[in-house]
Amino acid sequence: MTNLPAAPTSTTYRPPARLVLEDGTVLVGRGFGAATETVGELVFNTSMMGYQEILTDPSYRGQTVLLTQPHIGNYGISNEDEESGKLWLSGFVVREACERASNFRSAIELSEYLAQHSVPGIEGIDTRMLTRIVRDRGEQRVLITRDMTSSPAQLVERLRKAPKVADVDHVLKVTTPTTYTWDRGYESQFSATPPVTATPGAKRRRIVAYDFGAKRNILRSLVACGLDVTVVPADTAAAAVLAMQPDGVFLSNGPGDPAICHYAIAAAKVLVQKLPVFGICLGHQILGHVFGAKTYKMKFGHHGGNQPVIDLTTGKVEITAQNHSYAVDPSSLPDNVEMTHKNLNDNTCEGLRHKELPVFSVQYHPEAAPGPHDALYLFRRFVELLGSTRHDRVKV
């Protein structure tokens, strides 16, 4: 399948580029960003805004992101909106990439930002059609290239010979190499209101946050709640964390298959017996493995800012931001672990808690920036849980 690039709508020349899928689909568009060739697993994201947060989210390492919102780049790039210090995704696919931003906060244009971080983009693609392909056939590898001389068959063969994304431990590629302290709360005037206001003079709780690919706004949210946060590498042993004598442990989001993160599962098995633990996204999946549950690869995952989730403990529904291709199988949960949140689109597991230990987790992102902010209350639950034990448990 081949399409022709739409007629340029600007005076800026963007060279022809091709997008190739494993199933043999070949689409022609226009290249922007870095003039390089990459392979990634294609996922689509339905968020209406927040493309910079998506670009800098470490959970997208190994993936090529397709945005269903047709016009991207119109508000430019701002340093305040970065979720990490670099771009992690393999490629960027949009219907139309705006060449000139209109926003007083913008410091650089989208195409230049991608080029600086060696990420290729392609525009002029029928993103609605491509989204339907992913929904119907599932996530698959994709090649973005400006090679216009090789035949479609040659490009497909090149793609199929590339390493599979699932075979790589992406967490060890994105985690911090050293332990550090994070002490900055919400830094932008446009940030959400903190879910907990620290009481002046009150004892500050100290937590250790495992960096499996942690987003900055998670760390900001924890600090905004009055917590002292020490961030450690993903493969930090439980004994090293316990030696720090924290009041609790946080397990972050991150990329890839949780089943291959044996070091994280081993550490968490020890820590849940000693301290309150809160997990988000990959951290949620790791806790599932800790308690003997199974995870599975979803057909096309959840990626976007409009996923409806019901909190089964309160009956309230929240709109959530999500980014995951794996999920915990609720039928594999042991009797002492219960599902606390459920996705209202497909009934997948969105949250867990242990019935005896002060441990809970969610599959989605309560810290999402830009919003929605419906789930910020989860940080308050974590703060309330700190200092409790299995015998003195604060209900979460």
Image (cartoon, rainbow, N blue to C red):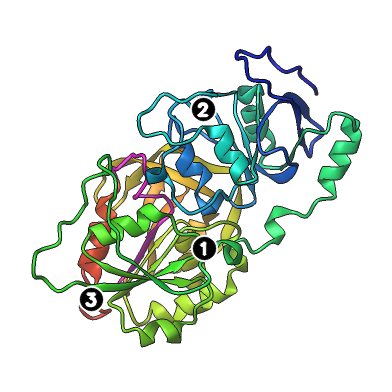
Q: Residue at x 20, y 66 (%)?
A: 384
Q: Residue at x 83, y 33 (%)?
A: 147
Q: Is residue 169 left or right of residue 349?
A: right
- Disc 2 residue type? Ile
For disc 3, the neighbor class at 10 Å (few under 14, some 14 to 19, many from 20) is: some
Q: On the image, numbered disc 2 is attached to which residue? A: 72
Residue 270 seen in the figure: yes
Of tags 2 and 3, the one toward the viewer is 2
Which of 137 and 250 lies nearest the eye of the viewer? 250
Q: Residue at x 30, y 47 (%)?
A: 375
- Disc 1 residue type? Ser
The residues bearing labels 3 and 1 have C-alpha atoms spaced at a distance of 27 Å
Q: Residue at x 81, y 44 (%)?
A: 159
The residues bearing labels 2 and 3 have C-alpha atoms spaced at a distance of 46 Å
Does residue 365 belong to the magenta stretch? yes
Q: Any mark on residue 388, and which? A: 3
Region rendered in magenta = 358-374
On screen, residue 258 above or below 35: below
For disc 2, the neighbor class at 10 Å (few under 14, some 14 to 19, many from 20) is: many
